Image: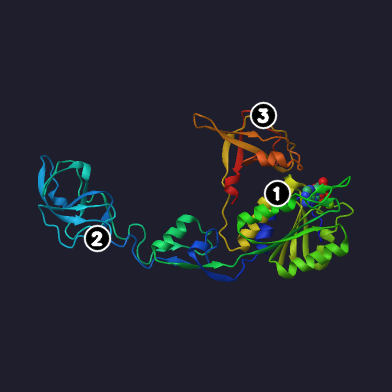
Amino acid sequence: MTHSPLLSLDDALTRIKTAVQPIVGREQIVLNMALGRTLAEDIQSPIDVPAYTNSAMDGYTVVGSDLPAESKITLKVIGTSSAGHPFDGEVQPGQTVRIMTGAMLPRGADTVVMQEQVERDGDNARIGPGHKPGQHVRYAGEDLSIGQPVLKTGRKLVPADLGSLASLGFGETSVKRRLRVAFFSTGDELRSIGQPLAEGEIYDSNRYTLHAMLTRLGVDLIDMGIVPDQRGAIEQAFLDAATIADTVITSGGASVGEADYVSETLAKLGQVDFWKIAIKPGKPLAFGTINDTLFFGLPGNPVSAMVTFYLLVQPALLLQMGQDDITPLRLQVPCTTNLKKRPGRTEFQRGTLLRSKDGTLSVASSGAQGSHVLSSMSRANCFIVLPAESAGIRAGEQVEVQPFAGLI
Ligand code: AMP
Ligand code: MG
């Protein structure tokens, strides 16, 4: 165990990323089960999408060179092509075929004129000037062409990806197996919901925030409850967790209080670094391994636990799940409230990003910033990221925000 001086967030992230290996297991699953899973194969298109050149409009399909430059021309309507029912002939100059959106372009035709711009009179269709050859046509392979890379290993599958896979005819896909994450809370003061609270006791809330944040990542959860501040109990919990999980996350006991046995036990069972990271909230973090199992010991304060999870644990889990490293979105916006800060650590204050009627964005503090104040975290929709050297913000100054929508 090392007690190092304050470590920068970037250095901590680099160390974590160096230590993390993506899991290797994969499974074949049907598309309808694949949302949010990590793709474990590179997908190339086996076909052209669209498979055939077709119309982007309801209208009339013509030979482009027939289109008049000035006066109107009259074409003979020789049939209809609708989606799923192509016209089985060839369009000659002077002819046209009624065509619907998505219907195959008949041989000879290369252009579509919208039906609103065509005067139909029996078998005749009259078309005026102002059209371009090739207009309103979707070409075969325009979306995806045969052999083209479509999706890469490591992609977190979103609805449009599943639609793309379906458009290629794939009913199943290969994804990484789910990551197994065990978590528990430590602290003699903690009680589970439903138990009476004696003096000096509090309800365990971290297990609920952790459960929720992990659920969003799509991992398999193993909730191991509350473990008291006792060496034997903590050691047993770690050993149990390490045999069943890829990653173990605890909260509490990460400070250097007397009854905090987390880092001590970890040092005994595995390889552990105990870091003080130059961020606020969330300074202490234990990080290490027990055999092949990754371990994160988060601080007990509810907001510190969430901030360290989002900033340090989530990127590690995504890497372990085999997912691409996605840098969170950050924006520069004016801050409408004063923000207190002392120089020294990078602060992740809780903010509310607002869009005014004229479309401009601004941010305000979402309330008291104590690391125990979860209500201001509930109200927040972004972090206001204040650099280490900042000595506070006056209303009207620009700040950098990291929207929560970009956290996952
Ligand atoms: P610790 O990291 O154990 O020193 O805890 C720091 C603070 O967080 C203390 O006020 C604890 O009571 C509180 N705390 C620790 N674990 C939890 C938890 N699971 N839920 C709510 N508060 C907690
Ligand atoms: Mg404690």
**Tag 1 secondary structure:** helix
Answer with left or right where residue 117 lies relative to residue 147: left
Q: Which comes sooner in the sequence, label 2 or label 3?
A: 2
Residue at horizontal 19 percent and vertical 44 percent from the top: 131
**Circle 2 sits on which residue?**
85
Q: Which quarter of the figure is the N terminus placed in? A: bottom right
Colour scheme shown: rainbow
Please provide percent x and percent y for residue 184: 76, 58
Looking at the image, do the residues carrying marks 2 and 3 touch, with CB atoms under 8 Å apart?
Answer: no
**Circle 1 sits on which residue?**
306
Mark 1 vs ligand 1: CB below 8 Å? no
Q: Residues within 10 Å of mark 3 (few under 14, many from 20)?
A: some
Amino acid marked by disc 2: His
Residue 324, visible in the rendered structure: yes
Residues at marks 1 and 2, CA–CA distance in whole angstroms: 56 Å
Answer with left or right where residue 137 lies relative to residue 316: left
**Tag 3 secondary structure:** loop
Q: Residues within 10 Å of mark 2 (few under 14, many from 20)?
A: few
360 shown above or below 13: above
Closest to the observer: 101 or 321? 101
Residues at marks 3 and 1, CA–CA distance in whole angstroms: 27 Å
Residue 299, visible in the rendered structure: no
Please provide percent x and percent y for residue 116: 22, 42
Residue at horizontal 85 percent and vertical 63 percent from the top: 233
- The label number, if any, that marks residue 114 in the structure image: none
Amino acid marked by disc 3: Arg
**Circle 3 sits on which residue?**
394
Say which quarter of the image contains residue 249.
bottom right
